[in-house]
């Protein structure tokens, strides 16, 4: 697909999702984010970059880990995500955490500037993941490390039918290769291709828990990557899409609740 179109879909799609994102995904993404931060092993005083930072769910614990003597820069393609993170940083009094709108494939940052570069569940959305990994490598100091998390294999993510359900109603162009990096050694190969060495991988299973069908649909449609396409649905189309999605996750229903399986892949590499 056209890379420029994909960037527009990502930028404005996440602008649409921002008001729903933390409500539906904060707890569900926590296992991947926690493991990513463990593998980053941040220390006080370090300079950290968080690419595709969203509302700052990884940025703020990273900023806390490096302390006020350190520095964190969060970047995201979505203006609204960046604005939400900026407002949260101000409310927390975290002057050493700053946020900027920036394309992951064209970081307007200096070479050799950071000790660690993070990306929690962002790589699936980049038109050119290798270029984004090369940019992370470029801005890291020698000896620095990059840690990235992506969703795992499609057959281990019970919510995966959301993409064909939406695409059958409106061409979304969200992420045509969404599960590719989490399948096999896709993410490892991407970091190696960018120049990283000493690659370490952790693959973890998780359960996405939702208390109701409304929450399950809210996460899948309004709070995630298909939010822009979903915003174009009329009421009848939304109802129809909801029913089809709920049918796809019916095996994971427990009474009124849903417990949907998922998988995360977390990969770390070093810049020599």
Image (cartoon, grey):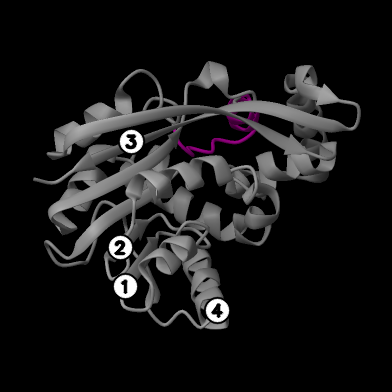
Residue 176 lies within the magenta run: no
Label 1–label 2 contact, CB within 8 A: yes
Which badge, 3 or 2, is on the more N-terminal residue? 2
Q: Is residue 128 left or right of residue 13?
A: left
For mark 3, what is the residue? 267
Q: At 33% across and 35% down in the image, what residue appears?
A: 267
Main SS of the magenta segment?
A: loop
Query: Element under label 2?
Result: strand
> Which secondary structure, mark 1?
strand
- Evaluate if marks 4 and 1 touch, with contact meaning CB atoms under 8 Å apart: no
The residue located at (47%, 56%) in the rendering is: 58
Q: Position of residue 13 (x, y in %)?
A: 54, 52
Q: Which mark is residue 71?
A: 1
Residue at x-position 77% and y-position 39%: 210
What distance separates the C-alpha of mark 3 from that of mark 2? 17 Å
The residue indicated by pointer 2 is 48
The residue identified by callout 4 is 92
Rounded to the nearest angstrom, the CA distance separating label 2 from label 4 is 18 Å
In this view, 184 is above or below 174: above
In the picture, measured across the screen, residue 221 lies left or right of residue 172, that is: right
């Amino acid at each position: 697909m056209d890379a420029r179109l994909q960037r527009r879909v990502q930028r404005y799609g996440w602008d649409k999702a921002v008001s729903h994102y933390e409500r539906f995904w904060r707890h569900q993404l926590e296992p991947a984010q926690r493991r990513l931060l463990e593998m980053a092993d941040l220390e006080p005083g370090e300079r950290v970059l968080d690419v595709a930072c969203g509302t700052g769910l990884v940025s703020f614990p990273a900023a806390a880990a490096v302390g006020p003597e350190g520095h964190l820069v969060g970047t995201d393609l979505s203006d609204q995500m960046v604005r939400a993170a900026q407002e949260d940083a101000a409310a927390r009094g975290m002057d050493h955490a700053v946020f900027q709108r920036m394309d992951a494939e064209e970081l307007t940052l200096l070479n050799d500037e950071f000790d660690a570069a993070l990306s929690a569940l962002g790589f699936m959305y980049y038109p050119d993941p290798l270029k984004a990994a090369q940019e992370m490598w470029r801005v890291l100091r020698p000896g620095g490390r990059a840690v990235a998390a992506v969703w795992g294999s499609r057959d281990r993510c019970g919510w995966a039918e959301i993409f064909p359900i939406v695409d059958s109603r409106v061409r979304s162009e969200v992420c045509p290769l969404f599960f590719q990096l989490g399948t096999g050694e896709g993410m490892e190969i991407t970091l190696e291709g960018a120049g990283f060495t000493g690659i370490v991988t952790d693959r973890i299973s998780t359960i996405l828990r939702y208390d109701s069908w409304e929450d399950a649909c809210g996460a899948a449609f309004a709070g995630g990557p298909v939010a822009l396409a979903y915003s174009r649905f009329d009421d009848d189309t939304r109802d129809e899409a909801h029913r089809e999605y709920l049918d796809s996750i019916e095996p994971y229903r427990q009474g009124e609740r849903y417990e949907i399986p998922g998988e995360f892949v977390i990969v770390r590499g070093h810049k020599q």
